[in-house]
Amino acid sequence: MSRLAIFAPTDADRESRVITDSAIRRLNVSGNANCPIEAAAGFFSLCASQSCGKCTPCRIGLRRLTDDLENILEGKGGEGIVDRLMDTCQALYTTSDCAIGFQAGRIGLAFADLIKEDAESHLERGICQQRFTSVPCVKGCPTHIDIPAYIDLVRAGRYADAVRVIRNDNPFPSACAFVCEHPCEATCRRGMIDAPINIRAIKQHAVLTAGFVPAPAKAPATGKRVAIIGGGPSGLSAAYYLALMGHDVTVFEQNDHLGGMMYYGIPRYRLPAENLDYDIDAILSLGVEVRYNTKVGVTVTWEEVEGSHDCVFVAIGAHHFRDLGIDYATREGVFSAVQFLHRSSSGRPIDMAGKDVVIVGGGNVAMDATRTAKRLGAASVRCVYRRRKKDMTALPEEVNAAVEEGCEIVELMSPVRVDAGTDKPIRLVVQPQMPGLYRGGRPGAKPTSAEETAFECDFLIEAIGQVIEYEYFTSKGLPAERGHFQADEHGRAVGMDKVFVGGDCETGPSTVIRAIDAGKAVAANIDAFLGFHHDVYDEVEIPPVSFDSKLACGRVNIRERSVFDRAHDFDGVEIPLRDEEAEQECSRCLRCDHYGMGTLRGGRPVKW
């Protein structure tokens, strides 16, 4: 008789896999304004379905959690039900045999405060404390652009109107069409069917096809004067909306070109200068005054700026570098990524032809420096990172592009010191690392017992973060903590009457889109502080809904120029969508603003 059967998947196995894959897609896009109690009940119910039933805490505890959460959703459960929830989670975490139970308990304990707050809201008021204010992609966008509207406008061929809709919430449609990290796509419900809509590509098609779109007419002059210190994405966003509101705006910019890190930090192959200038020209067309090469504290004093304006917005960004914090036997050939990229963008690039270059860091700035060094003719480019490649904070597509272009990613190596080299000016000594305990959602790094190794190079570029130059401003009363200005939720500097702060100098180094959001929010709050409530929306008629795309359809991605060509110049790397590609991608939109949201959970975005 036969002893063993050859394994073959059963129909049940295949069906289970299909359901699992569908659930993963659904969960990936479900982070938009979900009720925490409802989400927790679903999570613990899933965990219970995985339990083998061997250990009592898992078998009984997970079902009890699910039942208690369902009772809370119905506004019942009696006194002490919330404390019982936490006791059950603690028991699961400390006594379950395997990860099905103890990890579920750990998650419950980690979000105990949120679960408690929302449970009390359900029990006391019968409603969730969460607010359902808009569609998933709109909520996912930090600036809350009406994404379904401009997608349908692009589909209708109304490209200029699409740009006008974007500008209602973001005055940098062209720049963001190239460099936005597109968090909106992470919440796109189309991902439940096949893949999220390529929202950034559609925006790019709109701005490139529309060309220059004039800014709308501004409101009558208010007679109020606003000073903005810093001409980066946050400062210029505030300038745009404040000028539209009729205020007299002056921007104090320390460089000879506006744009901040968008101009001096992001390489031209990612963000062509002419596309950034489209946005800047539209902002300046509203009569915004710019004082170039003017650094507050050097060229002009704080007292002069504050005394001659009704309100001041400090948006100086984070342009000062942070070094490696190690011993340097030499600093010859050592640059910060900020300095390196600034020189390249200013037309004063470092001559790296035939040289060996090492970059230290794992973020987007490190990738920008890595790919820029390659384009400047470096013979070899290594990016050294102390964690794993998969743990890098840079966008995966940027990391992959660097590797495609011939750069090397050296993972799990931590800098120890900089010595003078034997064959090269610099010898970077590193200590091999291994993954450690999780911190902040990703594993840390810890030293191994392996011997130190070293990389000799001509240039060392440090890209481990930026800080702000705040000392002058704190001497004038602006509060700072841990290297950042302190502000309330409305952007007003703590303890100061007419001073607002925002962008990277308040949050720390972040993304372009988040800096834009800060500028927009501060503009609205400055307007209110000055005694106004202007409506700056440019009204655009949205096409009627004509959704007819429930079937799965492949996502159209932006193509890139051949690696053999793009790695040697600073021309744009992306090839925009063709008309038919953009039309198909637009047709995939599920129009969540019309379907599935309704009047109870929000429809069109509310004017800000």
Image (cartoon, rainbow, N blue to C red):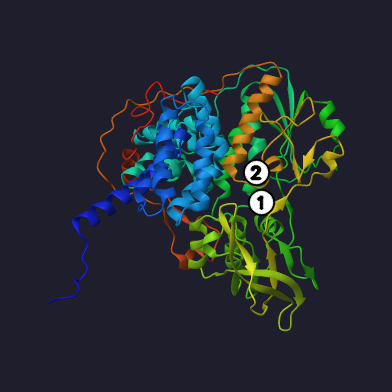
Image coordinates for residue 508, horizontal then vertical, percent: 68, 45
Q: Is residue 238 visible?
A: yes
Q: Is residue 191 above or below residue 119?
A: below
User: The residue under label 1 is which amino acid type?
Assistant: Tyr
Q: In the displayed image of the protein, which residue is found farthest to the left?
A: 1
Secondary structure, mark 2, is: loop
Q: Earlier in the sequence, mark 1 or mark 2?
A: 2
Secondary structure, mark 1, is: helix
Q: Which of these two is toward me, 133 or 216?
A: 133
Image coordinates for residue 246, horizontal then vertical, percent: 65, 21
Quadrant location of the N terminus in the rendered image: bottom left
**Where is mark 2, residue-wise?**
259
User: The residue under label 2 is which amino acid type?
Assistant: Gly
Q: How many marks?
A: 2
Circle 2 packing at 10 Å, graded few (<14), some (14-19), many (20+), is: many
Left or right placement of residue 365 versus residue 127 in this view: right
Circle 1/circle 2 CB separation < 8 Å? yes
Which residue is drawn at the image coordinates 87% and 39% (left, top)?
475
